[in-house]
Amino acid sequence: MRQFCFGVDVGGTTVKLGLFQPDGTLVEKWEIPTVTQNSGEQILPDIAASIQEKMDHHEIQKEQVLGIGLGVPGPVASDGIIYGAVNLGWGIFNIHKELSDLTGLKVKAGNDATIAALGEMWQGAGRGYKNVILATLGTGVGGGIIIDGQILSGFKGAAGEIGHMHVQDNEEEACSCGNFGCLEQYASATGIVRMANKILRTSDQNSVLRTDEEGISAKLVFDAVKKGDALAIEVAEIFGKYLGTAMANVANIADPEIILFGGGVSKAGEIILQYINKYYVLYAFQEAKNIPLAIATLGNDAGIYGGAKLIIN
Amino acid sequence: MRQFCFGVDVGGTTVKLGLFQPDGTLVEKWEIPTVTQNSGEQILPDIAASIQEKMDHHEIQKEQVLGIGLGVPGPVASDGIIYGAVNLGWGIFNIHKELSDLTGLKVKAGNDATIAALGEMWQGAGRGYKNVILATLGTGVGGGIIIDGQILSGFKGAAGEIGHMHVQDNEEEACSCGNFGCLEQYASATGIVRMANKILRTSDQNSVLRTDEEGISAKLVFDAVKKGDALAIEVAEIFGKYLGTAMANVANIADPEIILFGGGVSKAGEIILQYINKYYVLYAFQEAKNIPLAIATLGNDAGIYGGAKLIIN
């Protein structure tokens, strides 16, 4: 009997779904819109219906499905309790029970950044390793920590909140979380743009960042770094200093084999690693100084791969 | 059949041993000297002989013993491989196998700071919790992280190296690990004395710390803080700032239920918590701001309790 499982990545605008074989083969991937109205009450029924439709299409019987693994944008405890997911409108409930009741299938869920780390370990840049940290540098900074092949989830499923490590004492703007000086304020795509604009305002220095009519983006900053733009390099140094130091501290705490960087900012490529590594090697514990830092490879599919792996584990 | 287990804490000068019942009752505790000559080759045979002697004395048969759990001052991987323990003269070997061959008993070992955290969770200040972080503030700063009742050990058993988190960019003295600006340089007993001496040298301010003829100790500093000594309070502020910020960052990564402080410095009592908490609440993630910070209660026995729990787990 051929076996299958589903990996699901629930985002604020779309739900990504994948049908997998246990060996990691992605049979098919697709998306459905995330309907967040009415406290997101339609999201799980929509996922259940979409999965049923796909099973019908491929003539897959319930007995052939190992289960559904999901990543959601919020903390999930190991028993399936979700402690709210603001982007989806969700409050507190047991996602394992609710989606299992809707589908008759086994369900396991986790935080999306953590699930992405599991995906990268399974079929991405972390292949062959069992102790992997993934920092996702997007609109915010998310983190996932895998130790001995298992997700580090913590008491309320909030472990791995790398983006809210405190890295700067003199920050005057508040982070989205309410604190001041969080890593996310310097290492996210948003943070990079914020820093660039701040430096542009307080400096007369010539820079290609001044000439762009469409506004600054993290991509533009790192493109300028590649061209040797001094002001962009100043931004990259700050980015590298805080991210490299924070990852050294994470490594000192979690003792990983490899550290990966994903999310929009990582599309700038290997150049970001230079700036991160410069500070990482200064502050990592001796044993951790030489582990590889690398760019994640699964892109937006990391979540569905990680969801599937959650079931296969 | 009554059951027993042994908890062992291998230190640089003495080995502490405890005979336990599985319910946590400490039947007897004792110590033997640590013989570090000849690469510490006598340490395990001495432990084996001491345990056999105690079994004979109490007329305990091998079948009644669940095993021996040990804490050692160095990283231990989950398969028992020790990656060197300089204080003992040990190189790389499998401690599970060696001590098991000597005793015919099941053996499990871990890093001493981590094992102490397990002990505090079982029978100390962390009782009733399953997600516990212990910072041990002694000559150095050690750390143990327990998640869902299990030790976080990492790839090479070096997880929880809280003492070597980077907290200060402008430090000019090197830490024992070779890096600059590690938490240990400000939050250990040694670090507190170092800071106090530094401030005394650069300030004319009156202070009870100047009058002591026996030299400064961490205890003296916190005794002076209790008397309102301004210079001692300055030291306590730096201690609290770096330790509170670092523990907030650990909490953001590991999502614990409670954070404990042990080791010599913690004997100063609740007063250290005020200084730590002041910065902890500023920088912990919202969900982690309100978890308790507390003083560990098992003192020097935390290691033998943790060793025993390692076997019972």
Image (cartoon, coloured by chain):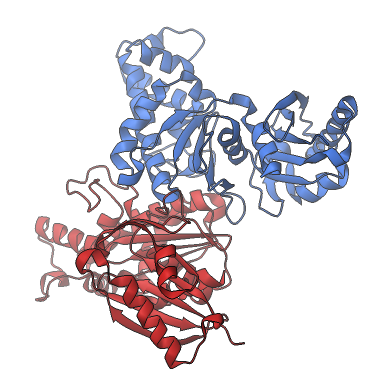
Chain colours: A red, B blue
Q: Which residue is depicted at the point 36% across and 65% down? A: A72
Of B151 and B20, which appears nearest the observer?
B20
Q: Which residue is depicted at the point 45% across and 14% down? A: B220
Looking at the image, residue A285 lies above or below residue B225: below
Which of the 4 image quadrants contains residue A134?
bottom left
What x and y, as percent, mark residue A10? Answer: 34, 71
Of B44 and B203, which appears nearest the observer?
B44
Of A93 and B226, which appears nearest the observer?
A93
Q: Which residue is depicted at the point 51% across and 65% down? A: A292
Residue B110 visible here: yes
Which of the 4 image quadrants contains residue A231?
bottom left
In which quadrant of the rendered image does the C terminus of chain B lie?
A: top right
In which quadrant of the rendered image does the N terminus of chain B lie?
A: top right
Looking at the image, residue A69 lies above or below residue A197: below
Of A21 and B253, which appears nearest the observer?
A21
Q: Which residue is depicted at the point 73% across and 32% down? A: B21
Looking at the image, residue B46 lies above or below residue B156: above
What x and y, as percent, mark residue A189? Answer: 25, 66
Which of the 4 image quadrants contains residue B87?
top right
